[in-house]
Image (tube, rainbow, N blue to C red):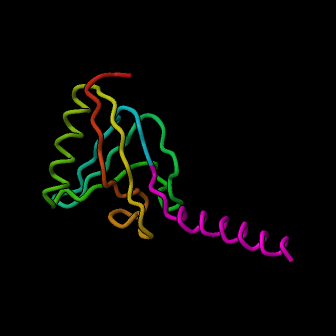
């Protein structure tokens, strides 16, 4: 009887782990290798480096951001500064269920870290 209870607890723990990580955000780090502006609404960036935990929808290997918002404009300014300075960036993608909501093949980015020193 104790074995069945232990198995049930372990099983529930494993299921809750996978359920909580089902929509983990993708992370890219490296230098900006390209930026593409999509009119006044969207921009795409390519990070030359790693892109871990990439969602299945992100088949292009790029990140997208909405440059029609103040947050998007600020992030895009930092992206351009990092690209021109040749600095390393870390991009965090969207961790909700609709992870490629701006451009269907690009993970929507939600956070940018701009490293001022190489490491």
Give the quarter of the figure containing the N terminus.
bottom right
Instruction: List x then y, in percent, for residue 33.
Output: 35, 34
Instruction: List x then y, in percent, for residue 41.
Output: 20, 61
Q: Is residue 33 above or below residue 91?
A: above
Q: Is residue 102 left or right of residue 85?
A: right
Q: Nearer the viewer, residue 112 or 104?
A: 112
Quarter where residue 106 is shown? bottom left
Magenta run includes residue 52: no
Instruction: List x then y, in percent, for residue 113.
Output: 29, 40
Q: Nearer the viewer, residue 13 or 26?
A: 13
Who's the residue at 33% across and 36% down the image?
Answer: 89
In this view, which residue lies farthest toward the left? 70
Q: Nearer the viewer, residue 96 or 84?
A: 96
Q: Nearer the viewer, residue 78 or 119?
A: 119
Who's the residue at 15% across and 48% down the image?
Answer: 74
Q: Is residue 18 left or right of residue 50?
A: right
Quarter where residue 98 is shown? bottom left
The residue range painted magenta reads 1-26
């Amino acid at each position: 009887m104790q074995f069945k209870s232990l198995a049930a607890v372990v099983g529930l723990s494993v299921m809750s782990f996978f359920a909580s990580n089902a929509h983990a955000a993708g992370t890219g780090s490296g230098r900006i290798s390209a930026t593409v502006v999509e009119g006044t609404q969207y921009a795409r960036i390519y990070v030359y480096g790693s892109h871990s935990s990439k969602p299945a929808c992100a088949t292009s290997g790029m990140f997208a951001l909405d440059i029609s918002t103040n947050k998007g404009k600020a992030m895009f300014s930092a992206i351009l500064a990092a690209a021109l300075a040749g600095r390393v960036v870390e991009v965090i993608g969207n961790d909700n269920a609709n992870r490629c909501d701006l451009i269907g093949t690009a993970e929507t980015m939600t956070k940018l870290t701009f490293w001022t020193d190489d490491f």
